Amino acid sequence: MDSEERKMIDCLSAANSSSAEQREALQGISEKLEECYILNLSPPGELIAVLDIFFRKSGIDSTLKNKAKRLHKKYKT
């Protein structure tokens, strides 16, 4: 896992992240997962796990929660 992935995971895991920061982190995770899919690589387990945790949290913007849920469903193995 590189520092960019760690930063995205930390942003989604942090309770004090703004909605804009979470949106940006989800976009980065989406791009990383799409890249793995195109290259026929297995997706990083840490990214899938953080998506699972994120969309199950309460108090999250519903559009972000739905995006995380769609990404999790699409890329989980």
Image: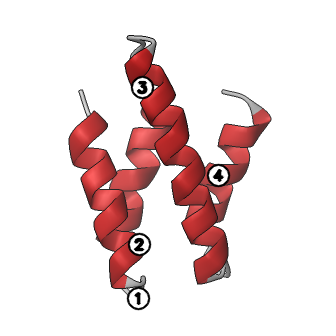
**As drawn, 58 above or below 77:** below
Marks 2 and 3, Cα distance to the nearest angstrom? 20 Å
Image quarter (top left, top right, bottom left or bottom right) of the C terminus: top left
Marks 4 and 3, Cα distance to the nearest angstrom? 15 Å
How busy is the neighbourhood of tag 1: few (under 14 within 10 Å), some, or many (20 plus)? few
- The local secondary structure at tag 4 comes to helix
The residue under the point 35% across, 71% down is 65
**As drawn, 4 above or below 18:** above
Residue 43 shows which numbered tag?
3
Which residue corresponds to mark 1? 59
Query: What amino acid is found at the position of numbered circle 1 in the picture?
Result: Gly
Quadrant housing residue 3: top right
Marks 3 and 1, Cα distance to the nearest angstrom? 27 Å
Is 66 left, or right, of 20 in this rendering? Answer: left
The residue under the point 65% across, 52% down is 8
Tell me whether circle 2 and circle 3 mark residues in contact (CB < 8 Å).
no
Earlier along the polypeptide chain: callout 3 or callout 1?
3
